[in-house]
Amino acid sequence: MRLRQSAALIAAAATSVLGLPVAAHAAAAGGTLYVDNSSASCADAGGGAADRPYCTISAAAAAVQPGQTVLVKDGGAHYRESVRVTRSGTRELPITFLGLTAPTGGKSAVAPDAEVSAFELTGVHDVVVRNFATARYAPPGTAPLVSVTDSSRITLDRFWFGTGAPGVPAVRISGAGDHVTVGRSYFSTGSGGVSVAAGARSSLITGNDFNHAATASVTATDAPDTAITYNTIGFSCGESVRIDGASPGAVVENNVITAQHAGAIHPPGSGPADAVCTTAANGRGETEISVSAGSTSGSKVDFNTVHPWPDASAYTWGGASYPTAAAFAAAQPGQATHDVDLDATFDLTLDSFSYERLTDADRSAVDSADPAAPGLDTDLVGMGPLDDPDVPNTAPGGALRDRGAYELTGQRKVTLAVTGNRASQGPAPFEVTATATVVNTWGTPQTDYTFDFGDGTAPVHSTSPTVGHVYQQPGMYYATVTATDAHGVQVSAESQGTYVTEPGDLTLSFGVQTDLDLNATVIADARSPWRIYSYEYDYGDGNARTSAFTHHYAAPGSYTVTVTATDEGGRTVSSSRQVEMKLRDPLTELQPGERVQLVSSVGPQVVDAGANYTSRYWSKPRSLPLNQAVGVNDWVKSVATAVGSDQIQRTFTLINGRIFGLDRNVGPSTGSVGQGELTWPYWYEVTAATQAGPLSGVTRIAVATIGSSTHVVALAGGRVYEASGSPSHGWSRWGDITAAVGFPGGVTAIAAGTTGNTLHVAMEGADWHIRVADGDYDRGRWSGADMSAAYGGPLGADQLAAATTPGSRFHVVALRGGRIYEITGDYAAGYWTGWGDISAATGRADFSRIAAGATGNSLRLFAIASNGNVLNATGDYTAGRWSDFAAVNVLNATPATGPGIADEIGAVGF
């Protein structure tokens, strides 16, 4: 059906309607120019033929003639240009710029790099621009996305407008022109609206969806005879409609306008408008429809739904504000007679391009539009008027058109499932069944289902929602269906992919990972053209078959594990293997060999785990719980550990600026203290007044041993201090190493180690230089050197670590920006090496913390990766190479759980 239009706007609307004879006439008279920037044969110097298209729209715009269509393909890449239209058509032969697809799918997108408009139409007439998306890659400027200046009989139809700059309209119409139509377009969240400026006459803004506009949605200033009809306007930052200056003869009809609704597509606070426009004081529009005193003559406001902000007016007319339609109609007879306050809920369940669509609950907007208002024949998605069987027709003459940009339909959505046998995968030829499920709230019967199976075969039309198909060739296929009801309303959907494979057998292989706590994990790998339907496991200990791939055995022994796999083709295969289950030796980590103890912390938790590199074994992590005196909920800021000649492992933590220690025997069993037990079952405080004494402002700690004496090094207030001793023999008071060696303050990182009877402390100063202080306890003196001054290296290290290897070699490891570097001082030979790049050698540079220990002639380096996991790499100085970083538990031939995610780490080799 064709809607009646006002005589002043017939010409403008006629060029806007899809399917009018003028489009076919134009193509026949002028032909088509093709634009495709994805084509290898495109050339702006070509002629725009289908096999040699233009690369840019601008090149076509410079050549197009009346009656021609510029057909723009969406090649995947956007057209990064500003299209300046300077050529005109005629009333009978307009020029048309046409994107290949409508806003219901992909769109030809024009997105300039500069702060300019995507389309500029200046001094032209009889031009149609349809089916484009517009945005701007450059930072938002003052230019609208589309600009129409001094132009007449222009149609902008089926646009998608991207986010714009606050206060800048998406479309600006200005200058001495008339009959410009902006129709059936979507103005996305945060975009500007439409501005009709001085000089423009008889503009038609119709069938658009304005969603959270960053400006008033539609503004007309000194622009007579502007018609604003059939728009859905939600949550504008400013008025929904503002008729300003001298703009008489305005028509504001058949719009759905809402300022705020919690159930709409963007709840309050989630979109740009709600974020900016929350009160009148910061720019929120207080009126939804405003008509200035100079614009009231001949203007008409009616047949709208208007829901204002709770504390705002719905209308302003000639300077007077009215909170409701009833108040407005009473004061201004003939205005808003059919307006209602509708808190529109909108339908968010549809799969198609439809944001603020009406629902069955929005009855006052359904079948109630004024048919005399100017507009287009269809709604934003191409739907003509439909009669809702559950809503009385209240429009004049019983017209069926709904208010707003979308016609309510019973046909809401369709889903598509494509399955073969029990799933969506199988060998070719693969027989499938496609089933469409439609949601139609009106109960309208379906007249057609069109299935496209995506394999190049012809689409299948059916009156049944279920059809069969056979895929003949291997590949991944995506089927689509379009369901059409008796009203001609269509909804479409795409299925999940159907994977058609090469024919083949079902095969199975598997392995079993065991630990020393009698736990087994089966890793099965079944291969089939069909999906694997199930695995079943028989662990050979008399228990029933199970689907669990992990199992705990009651006792050590030899067991036969059998795995059975079944695919979705109904085929089954089994395989068996023997496994030996052994109990853990709780002291394996402490048996003779190259051993390391690794201490880590996560928040208030401290964990210790041991590695025996000779046995390729990691112990399970053991928690070192904090007691109440330490602070069980306080975060650990630094950890360090060392083993003395007495085979006591001493672990230290920094909590709330205080240093606490815990001791454990890691040597052979002696007397009543067994190997691996805690010598003291509680944490003691080094910074206690009766021990080394308080030390304010401690931020990092390090530890090293000389014989059975433990040296705790602390960084406090930019200076480095040291205390030595043990709980059984007492502690020395804190001494200032930076003062003893004459190093500057401002220290940010420390590490410590020993060679013979000398304590080495590496520190980074405020000047980013790394220095090493040597405390010779045989001679009773301190000395030091500036490594950065002598050897350069990673200025500005984030952390330091240290360890010693045989031959009096002291290794300093530095972490900077995720990369790890190392320098070695050979105190026996009397020289330092230059800095080496461990990250380059290992291929990893994403670390946040490091720790180092030494076993034999190998440096065991531990690091926390960007994901929080603890990794290990080994520098073998005998072989002269570094291993790659790997998870710590890979050392175990039968993997156990190693330390997991950590904040801080400390390590010692012994």
Image: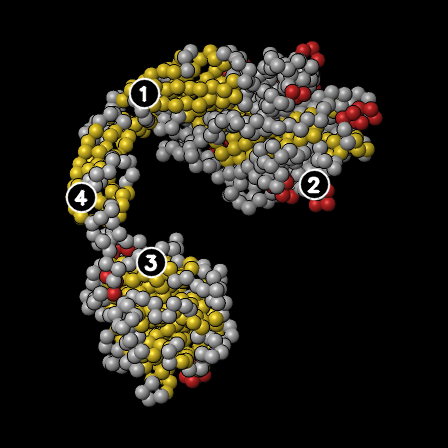
Q: Amino acid at mark 1?
A: Val
Q: Residue furthest right?
A: 331
Q: CA distance from mark 2 to mark 3?
A: 59 Å
Q: Nearer the viewer's eye, disc 1 or disc 2?
A: 1
Inter-mark Cα distance, 2 to 4: 75 Å
Marker disc for residue 284:
2
Residue 825 falls in which quadrant of the image? bottom left
Circles 2 and 3: CB distance less than 8 Å?
no
Residue that numbered label 1 is attached to: 432
Q: Residue at x 59, y 40 (%)?
A: 270
Q: Nearer the viewer, residue 562 or 780?
A: 562
**Answer yes or no: do the residues labelled 4 and 3 have beta carbons within 8 Å?**
no
Residue at numbered disc 4: 559
Disc 1 to disc 3, how far (Cα)? 52 Å
Q: Quadrant of residue 572?
A: top left
Using the image, determine if residue 54 lies above or below residue 897: above
Q: Residue at x 50, y 14 (%)?
A: 485
Mark in front: 1 vs 3: 3
Q: CA distance from mark 4 to mark 1?
A: 43 Å
Mark nearest the camera among 4 and 1 is: 4
Q: Quadrant of residue 511?
A: top left
Image quadrant containing the C terminus = bottom left
Residue kind at label 4, given as amino acid type: Tyr
> x and y percent of residue 550 in the render?
28, 43
For label 3, the residue is: 621
Of circles 2 and 3, which is in front?
A: 3
Counting residues from the start of the chain, the first of labels 2 and 4 encountered is 2
